[in-house]
Amino acid sequence: MPVTVILGTQWGDEGKGKAIDTFAGDFDFAARYNGGNNAGHTIINEFGEFKIHLVPSGIFYPRVKCLIGGGVVIDPAVLIEEMKSLGHAGVKLEKRLFISPRAHVIMPYHKILDGLYEEAKGAGATGTTRRGIGPTFADKVSYNGIRWSDFADKEAFANKLRMQVALKNKIIAALGGSPLDFDKVHDEYRGYYDGIKPFITELFGIVQDGLRNGKKFLLEQAMGSILDTDWGTYPFVTASTTLASAATAGLGIPPRAISRVIGVTKAYTTRVGAGPMPTEVKDDARAEKALSEVAATTGRIRRGGWFDAELTRFAAQVNGIDRLFLTKLDILSEFEEIKVCTGYEFNGRRVHYYDLDAYQLERVQPIYKIVKGWHSDIRGIRKYRDLPAKARAYVEMIEKLSGVKVGWVANGPQREAVIVRQ
């Protein structure tokens, strides 16, 4: 299959890094096509444990070439630190990592404005990661963005940056922040460019030649489907399109070239930041503790909740998902009873996710089915038939409710902790 997209079906943090690491060795190219360093993929392998934010997770396989598409916004300080960390671990980047000159750059004023906007909103804050992602995408669509291609002409870059610093300083000052110094920003970012320049190259020819020659591409989505700008819980979403279709704009992949879409789905539900979460556990301290997590990127606590089949079903339909990669089934092993949300009620009637806006979704009543847990440790199991009968029943209920077959079940953090069902 020439092009496979791996994406999250929930609010991110589904375990995409593990899924990507499972498949990447069979591909010629791995690529990021959306988002920025507000998303992290956790990888555990023979090199160690890594939280990857910008470099495609396929970088750990020596034969795989990795692409960062123009649909990604890049914080150069984060990228350089990530590249250094990989290099120190013995991962070769030269002639393997390629960065699009079309990718927009996260500037210092973007991060400052991200925080000032959140503070100004008060109780209505969106709950962003304050990494500057939203303001960078806003500049992109309002013709104020700076791309890596702009750095090639020193004078043109300086003129463009000078105009943006002057413009942004007015907004920063109006919101109570301290204005930026042009010379300091200019010199700092010229330095970043010098370090990244050897990896910047136009990707369109690489992609088209690869497709024409039958090379296999693995596309890594950032964030999750329900954080999509258009189809997510707006305004509590991310700033980029997160669906499989975003690969066309973000990397130059024609839609008809996408031959398989794998949806990564956690066996329960988590969410970072503000916004609706119908199945969030609030009245069971033990369950809340077990299902809550620490976010790989921000260190914030992920709100925990039961599996929401309504969300996963919608994500499967809007993305055209072929198979599910179910993660963290082992976390549910401690429960004697497990709840599964099969749908919603709103004002006394049955509704779907797509019938509602974010504020209505806050008020829905989840319809739960309660099933018996298997209440045993499953982390060492590597064959599906060896799982407890109740664990298998849970997996099969998820695929029935979502309308998509579960092809893989992850039951531990290690690379080998994956049960293949296909």
Image (cartoon, rainbow, N blue to C red):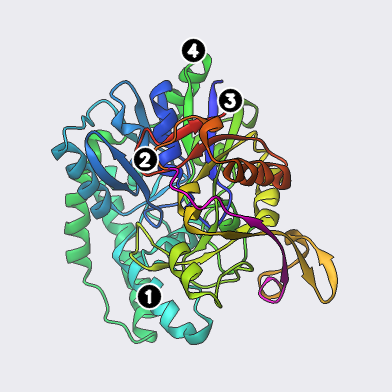
- Identify the residue under disc 2: 101
Amino acid bearing label 3: Gln
CA gap, disc 4 and disc 3: 27 Å
Contact check, label 2 and label 3, Cβ < 8 Å: no
CA gap, disc 1 and disc 4: 46 Å
Q: From the viewer's perspective, is 28 left or right of 304?
A: left
Amino acid bearing label 2: Pro
Whether the magenta-drawn stretch holds residue 374 is answered as: yes
The C terminus is located in which quarter? top right
- Identify the residue under disc 4: 213
Residue 168, given in percent of the width and then of the height, sits at 37, 72
Residue 53's place in the image compared with 283, above or below, is above
Q: Nearer the viewer, mark 2 or mark 3?
A: 3
Q: From the viewer's perspective, is 281 left or right of 206?
A: right
- Identify the residue under disc 1: 115
N-terminal label among 4 and 3? 4
CA gap, disc 1 and disc 3: 46 Å
Q: Nearer the viewer, residue 388 or 253?
A: 388
